[in-house]
Amino acid sequence: MAEVNAAHGITTGALARRLGVSPTTVRSWGQRYGIGPAAVRVSGRHRRWMPQDVAMLEEMCRLTATGVPPGEAARVVLRSRSTAWGGGEEVPASGAAEPERTGDDGLPLGDVRQECRGLARAAVRLDAPSMEALLDQVVRDHGLVTAWEEVMAPALHAVGRKWESAGDRYVEVEHLLSWQVSTALRRAAGTGPPAAKSPPVLLACMPGEFHTLPLEALAAALAERGVPLRMFGGAVPAEALDSAVRRSGPAVVVLWAQARSTAGQALARHVAGTVFGVRGARTAPLVLVAGPGWAGPAPAGGLVRPGGLREALEVIASVYGDVP
C-alpha cells in the first residue's frame, strides 16, 4: 500500500493497473455494486481511491479470482467495509470475510437471493422438476446474466464446496445441478434472434480444462443477443484450437481456465497472434482469457481478462458494435 498516497489516493487507471484489470471493470463494479472510492479530487472532479478503497478492491479481485460471482463478492467486501472499515478501524491484513451462512439444506450459501436458496434445496432433494421450473422462472424474471451471477453460480459453488468437504457425498447433487443449469442455459439461448452474419465468437476451454458451465453461460448470453458463436467446450487440444481459429476466422476468442495449471499463457498469446483472411485484409482475433485460472498479474501479449460475465459481454459488444 506504500505507493498509495494516504492524503490524495490514486486514480481509477492507476488502480486498474495495480489490480491487473481494466478500468472498465473498476467502474462497472462501482456502478453495479456500489463499490466506489471514498474521495473525489475537487479541482478536476476525478475519482481518487484511498488506501482503504484499494484494500477493498484487492479483496474483490481475490474473491472473483477464486470463482466467486462478482455480485456475491461485492456483498462480502461491502459488509466488511460497513463493519471493520466504517468505524475507522484498521483493515484486517488477511482480508477475511465473515463466516458463511449455512441454510437449511446444509450448503455454505452466504448472503444470496432467495431463489438461490430454493435452487440449492431442490438440488439436495434431487428434485429435478422443481429445479427446472425455478431456473426458467429466474431467467424470465431477472434475465440470464443476473440468473447466472446471483442464482446459478452461487448454488454451484456451494455444492462444489460441500462436495469437497464431504468426501463422496453430494456428487450426485453436483452432477444433477450442473445438468439442470446447462439445460436451462441452452433453453434460454434458443430464445434469441437468428445469429448475425459476422465473424463468430469462438469459445473453448484450455487443454486439460473440463469446467464448461461458465462458457455455456456466456454462449447463452451471446445467443440471446444474436451474436454468432462456435462453442467447442471442454479440454480443447492445442492443435485443435489452432485449427479451429484458422478455419473459422473468429472476431473474438474466449479461453476458459478454472485452474492455474490449465491457464497456458503461451498458447493464449499464440492464438492472439494468429492471422487469417485474404492478403491485404488479414486480421487477428481479440482474445479474452477468462476464469480464476488466469488470476495474477495483468496478462501480456494483447490478451484481455474480463472481470466476469457482464464485462465479457461488454468487451464483445465493443467489437460487434450493435450488441445490447
Image (tube, helix red, strand yellow):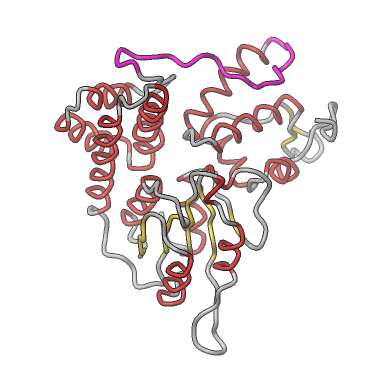
Q: Residue at x 73, y 11 (%)?
A: 89
- Residue 10, quarter of picture: top right
Viewport quadrant of the C terminus: bottom left
Return the x and y of residue 126 as percentages of the image width and height: 19, 27
Residue 230, x across and y down, in percent: 36, 64
Residue sitting nearer the eye, 307 or 192: 307
Magenta range is 87-106
Q: Tell me, yes or no, whether the highlighted magenta stretch contains residue 95.
A: yes
Which residue does the image show at 73% across and 32% down from the upper left? 49
Q: How many circles with numbers are drawn on the protein?
A: 0
Please, what is the dominant secondary structure of the magenta stretch?
loop
For this rendering, which residue is in front, 267 or 44?
267
Whether 195 is drawn above or below 191: the answer is below
Horizontally, is 26 left or right of 8 in the view? left
Image point (54%, 84%), residue name: 281
Q: Position of residue 201 (x, y in %)?
A: 42, 64
- Residue nearest the viewer, comparing 247 with 242: 242
Left or right position of 267 against 139: right
